Amino acid sequence: MKGLGIKESIIYMKKAYRYMEDNKKLFIIYVILSILVGIIGAIIPLISAQVVIHMQTEVWKQLVFVSLLFVSMKMLSSLVGYLSSKVSRVFYRETYLNLQVEVARSIIDLETVEIDKNSSGIFIDRLSQDTSNIAEVFRTIFKKLNIIITNVGILFAVFAINKVIFVYFLIVLFVMFNFERMYLVRHFERQKYFKKVKEVNTGLVSELVRGIRDIKVLNCYSDFESKIYQKLKNANNIQYQMSEMTKRYELLREFLKNLFNYIFILIGIYLIFKGNLVASSFVILFMYSDKIFDFLVTVIDLLEVLKDFNLSAERVFEIIDGKYKKEEFGDKTVKNLDGNFKFENVNFGYREDITVIKNMNLEIPAFKTTAIVGESGAGKTSVFNMITKLYRISSGRITIDGIDMNKLTEESLRGNISLITQNPYIFNFSVKENFQIVKKNVTMKEIEEVCKKACIHDYIMSLPEKYDTQLGEGGVTLSGGQRQRIAIARALLTNTKIILFDEATSALDNETQQNISEAISNLQGDYTIIIVAHRLSTIKESDQIVVMKKGSIVGVGTHKNLLKNNEYYQKLYASDISK
């Protein structure tokens, strides 16, 4: 069994079993029914052999009884098979769901850098297809085992009729099994490579769908089409080669099958000629010969299922068990954080060989408004990525209210911070549902209040279905400013004391920007507000402005103070008001 991965299958099945423990009773019922189906399936050929024997002896009473028993067992087999199938479908559904939820949870727990450096296809395929393969394997195994047990019954029936033919069938099984085994090992290696290629293509197609608008406005149809064509062509070629190899194998298998059948006929004729076999028994044995090949095919199918299962399990448990780095949090629970941040000699980079933030030392006071300004690439957004722990710092320490950020639980940290990004993601739900994912039992009154604060309520009320209007994937039906205002309202609904605005007013027109600035101003004093700003005119009233240049802090103070004493800030402000 070398190369067939039986040991790996057992290991992965133990892991997969964890996700069906909620349905343990259902699983036990399914196992019992499956065993019963197998036993009945094994008995039926033995009964049919008795029919053949009694036909030869012409003992009619026994023949009628055995025939009636044969029909009864077939009916019982159909009934038990139906019940087993029904239980297996429920069992599969629940196991598949548990696995998908666990993989989805594990993907969410991954470090952001892992998402950045891997194709989305890796996670999409594993969440959808591979989890299905794992959930499917248990009922497939029992289904195949039922057929195998049934065919073992056939072997015993052959043994009862003629022992020479029985030995010949065993030889055929041995030869064909090794032939099938060689094919299976080759097929598995091809399949493994194909899945990797398919992951890349899934990611590329996903990018096509998400980036279709940019492809159109950039007028890069031909280049993107050419790229997709080459990728898909490569995948299709691999799939064609796999299909061609399978067809050649099937042709050779059919040839061997016919050769063995021919030899079987010669052996049968010889036994009949010698008086060791009657013609009617030979006919029955000939009918059984196909079942023997079915037995072999079923064994190989089972091994192939296990191989595919191993591959899917390996890919899924890489995500669940930690090939990809997962976010790490502490165990200290704090219900409410005020937002007194302190950066102590902090260094940070998105890659190990590139430093974005250099030796940052900074204090951000609670219940004050702090703005972070600087040119593009200065490291402004990186400060937010560190505060929310979307990325780990390279060295140094960040504390919140005197607590090392790394000691806090995920809920204590992120449950106390609201972030409004420059390009917020609006889910393909209704307006109301976009708020319900933030706060499950939110009332319409609460939704309307935060929407009014964010200056988006009037627009929503102008929509045909108002708060029940579907917003499309990514909020495609909204303008950039409207998406940001919904995101602001969504953040206000969480009622955290720490609110981060990452260029949140950059896409708004002057009038709306003024409204949002007033909304932010209304929050001052009650919230710790940190604003990454491109337009300096919007943050003049901030309690503290942090000026950044190429990953370093080059000034901290009020607008008036910096305008008076900081040459770099003067340059930034002059450039801003001239626009």
Image: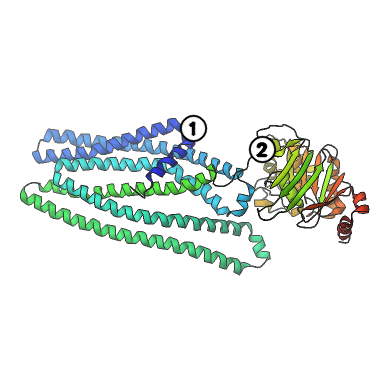
Task: Specify which label sits upstream in the sequence, 2 or 1.
Answer: 1
- Residue 26 place in picture, x, y as percent: 43, 32
Q: Quadrant of residue 446?
A: top right
The answer to whether residue 191 is left or right of residue 341 is left
- Residue 256 place in picture, x, y as percent: 24, 57
Q: Quadrant of the C terminus?
A: bottom right
Residue drawn at 46 percent across, 57 percent down: 193
- On the question of residue 482 being in view, the answer is no
Q: Disc 2 vs disc 1: Cβ atoms closer than 8 Å?
A: no
Residue 140 numbered mark, or none: none
The answer to whether residue 38 is left or right of residue 361 is left
Residue drawn at 17 percent across, 33 percent down: 65
Query: Which residue, given by chain and number where applicable, does mark 2 sit on?
Result: 410
Residue drawn at 35 percent across, 32 percent down: 32
- Residue 111 place in picture, x, y as percent: 62, 46
Amino acid identity at mark 2: Glu
Q: Quadrant of residue 403?
A: top right
Q: Secondary structure at mark 2?
A: helix
- Badge 2: few (under 14), some or many (20 or more) residues near its Cα, within 10 Å? many
Give the Cα distance between marks 2 and 1.
27 Å
Amino acid identity at mark 1: Asp
- Residue 325 place in picture, x, y as percent: 59, 46
The answer to whether residue 351 is left or right of residue 104 is right
Q: Secondary structure at mark 1?
A: helix
Query: Which residue, given by chain and number where applicable, does mark 1 sit on?
Result: 22
